[in-house]
Amino acid sequence: MDLLLMSFAGVTAKEYLTIQQQGNITPSLYAKIQRTKTLNRHDIIRRLDQDNIGYITYEHELYPPLLKEIYDFPYILYYRGNLSILSEKMLGVVGSRKASGYTKKALEKILPELDNIAVVSGLAYGADEAAHRIAVEHNMKTIGVLAFGHHTHYPKTTADIRRQMEQDHITISEYPPDTPINKWQFVARNRIIAGAAQGVLVTEAEEKSGSLITLEMALDENRNGYCLPGNITSPLSAGTNLRIQEGASAVTAASDIQADFS
C-alpha cells in the first residue's frame, strides 16, 4: 500500500502494524483504507514541495536505524531541514518544562564536549529548548521531534529556534502537515525521541513527570538511561535522583555519556 496516502488518510503506526500483521481490521481502520483511494498523490506531493516539507518511509536508507527497532515505529516521517542528520548517533535530552537554571548550566557544560553525537529533543519549553539552543550555539547537530504537523507550532518560545533548525538542522514529525495539536500525540512523540536515540538524558524531573516516562521508554528499548544528580531539597530533582538510585547512570561530565557512544 502507498504509505504516503495511508498517512494522509490518518492510519496510525499501530494500525499500520495491524495491516502488516494481517490482524483484525476495525471499521475505523477499514474506512481509512478506503479513504486512501480518494486521495490524489500528485496533489499531496505538490503541496509538500510548496511548503518545503519532505518525507521518508521506514524503508529509506536515512531512516533512523534504532527507531525502526521499536514496536510501534512511525512508518513515515515528514521533515524540514538536513535529512542526513538522521543517520547520526543521537542523545535524547528531556526534562521539566519548569526547568531551573541548573538545567541550562549543566547542559552548557556537558553537551559541547560530546563528540559526533546529535541532540534530539521535543522543542518544548524548558529543558528541550535549552538543549536545542545550546546545540545550535556550539555547532552541534540537533533534531526537533514535533508532536503535530509542520504547519503548527507550540510553544511560541521555541518558534525562532525551530526556524533556525529547519534551515541548518532538522525537524521531523510522523503526522501530515495539517495535523493539529492533540494531547496524546505528545506521549507518542516521546517514543520517537526514546527510540531514535542511543541514550536519553533527563536533566530535571519531578517524581511524576513525562520526562521520566520517556526515560522508561528508552530503557524498555535497551537504550542507555542518564540523569543529572540534583539538589535533594529541589522537587525538580526528586525524579532524577530516584532514577539514579534505581540504576540510571548519574551524569556529571560529558565523558559519562561519551563512553557509551564510542
Image: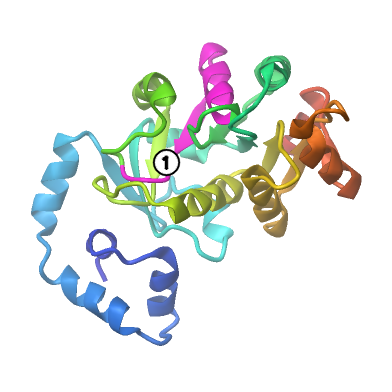
- The residue lying at 53 percent from left, 15 percent from top is 139
Above or below: residue 140 compared with residue 85: above
Q: Is residue 17 left or right of residue 54?
A: right
Q: Is residue 116 left or right of residue 225?
A: left
The x, y position of residue 116, in whole percent, is: 62, 27
Instruction: Give the mark count.
Output: 1
Q: Is residue 140 magenta?
A: yes
Above or below: residue 119 compared with residue 45: above
- The residue lying at 48 percent from left, 39 percent from top is 86
Please state which amino acid type lies under the numbered disc 1. Answer: Leu
**Mark 1 surroundings within 10 Å by alpha-carbon count, few (fewer than 14), some (14 through 19), many (20 or more):** many
Instruction: Indicate the quadrant containing the C terminus: top left, top right, bottom left or bottom right.
Output: top right
The answer, for residue 259, to whether it is visible in the render is: no
- The residue lying at 88 percent from left, 30 percent from top is 232
Q: Quadrant of residue 252?
A: top right
The x, y position of residue 75, in whole percent, is: 40, 60
Above or below: residue 81 compared with residue 55: above
Instruction: Indicate the quadrant containing the N terminus: top left, top right, bottom left or bottom right.
Output: bottom left
Q: Is residue 212 magenta?
A: no
Q: Quadrant of residue 197?
A: top right
What stretch of residues is rendered in magenta?
128-149
The answer, for residue 129, to whether it is visible in the render is: yes
Circle 1 sits on which residue?
146
Q: Secondary structure at mark 1?
A: loop
147 or 169, which lies in front?
147
Q: Residue furthest top?
A: 137
The x, y position of residue 126, in whole percent, is: 57, 27
The x, y position of residue 123, in whole percent, is: 48, 32
